[in-house]
Image: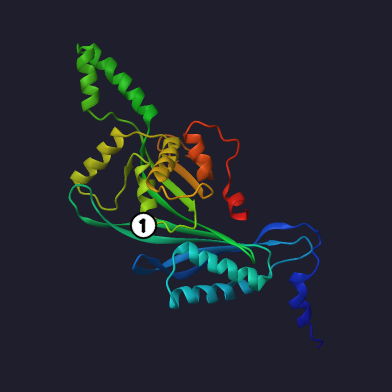
Amino acid sequence: MPDRSHLVDDMQASAPPVELALSRAGVTGVQKAIRIRRGDAETVMAADIECTVDLARGQKGVHMSRFPEVFDEAIGDAVLGEARIIEEIAEVIARHIVERQNAHRAEVRITARWPMRRVTPVTGLPTQEMVSLIGIAAATADASRRVVGVEATGINACPCAQGLVAGRAAERLTDAGFGAEAIEQILELVPIATHNQRGKGTLLVGTTSEIDAETLVDLVERSMSAPVFELLKRPDELFVVEHAHLQPRFVEDSVRVALKNLLDEVPGLANDDFVLSRQVNLETIHAHDVLAERWGTVGELRSEMQGTETARQTTLADWLTA
């Protein structure tokens, strides 16, 4: 039988039936263990990895079998060697992919589930919350850019429904004989009912500076009406519910608050650094969910917050390829 192995080896490099370049081609849903460094501490986490390269119009396909080899090499170094921050691991893999695939550009996204230990707000009981730690990197042979981010969960209390309930309560109190001043005092003292939404907030930052993931989690949680806890005793539950209803927020509010607090509390960010805030609220009185997003460079956001309309909002894809 004739040796046809060279045909298999050259298949990906052959001409495609339609000569059209592809923006991304690669593998997704790869599960690996990675070792993460946080300050002086280290931990091993399970992670999902997606890795893609751009594909020239004259190349039929990428060498998919090489991706697992590169993952094993790069992650083996990250697990067995010096521990790294998650965005650095993504950058290491992206650089390996560019070299091994002879690609012009590679992009890697890693999402790991990260356990955070906290205490409940009133009783002080220890509890563990799971958040998503995100690392993204894009690399060419000459340069690379990377992004760190988190996704965390909280509660948003709807301001619109709360306003309607407050209006109806004022009408009933008036009918019951209460005066305007007494009604105003009652509505200020008593938390007003509304419908709650579990919110998922995401915050991404593209920078060469090292940012603590716990800082990003705190910013995301504070952008919502209240945080959530896996364990709650009755005093803790009362605190969370009251806190949420005293700070009602729309999905759009959470995005804006997260970005403002990021710029206020992490002042070292450069104007050409990138930020993205995303909020998804899971509705309770509708069959659909709601979302809001904002992306751009730090300079674009600072300018707009100072009152200048920005003609451009730099996307994550734009920033990574810049």
Between residue 112 and residue 298, name the one nearer to us: 298
Left or right position of 177 against 25? left
Q: Is residue 218 visible?
A: yes
**Residue type at numbered disc 1:** Met
In the rendered image, residue 124, in percent from the top left (x then y), is placed at: 19, 52
Instruction: Tell me what residue is drawn at x 30 percent, y 38 percent.
Output: 244
- Pinpoint residue 153: horizontal percent, then vertical percent: 38, 48
In the image, 230 versus 301, the foreground residue is: 301
Q: Image point 58% across, 44% down: which residue?
A: 314
Rendered location of residue 237, percent (x, y): 23, 44
297 is higher (above) or lower (below) than 214: above
- Of residues 147 and 209, which is closer to you in this image? 209
List the residue tagged with mark 1: 130
Image: 173 above or below 300: above
Q: Local crowd at mark 1 within 10 Å, few (<14), some, or many (≥20)?
A: some
Q: Is residue 80 left or right of residue 218?
A: right
Quadrant where the image shows the N terminus: bottom right
Q: For numbered disc 1, what is the local secondary structure? A: strand
Percent across and percent down for residue 5 are 76, 82
Q: Quadrant of residue 150?
A: bottom left
Does residue 253 appear to the left or right of 226 in the view shown?
right
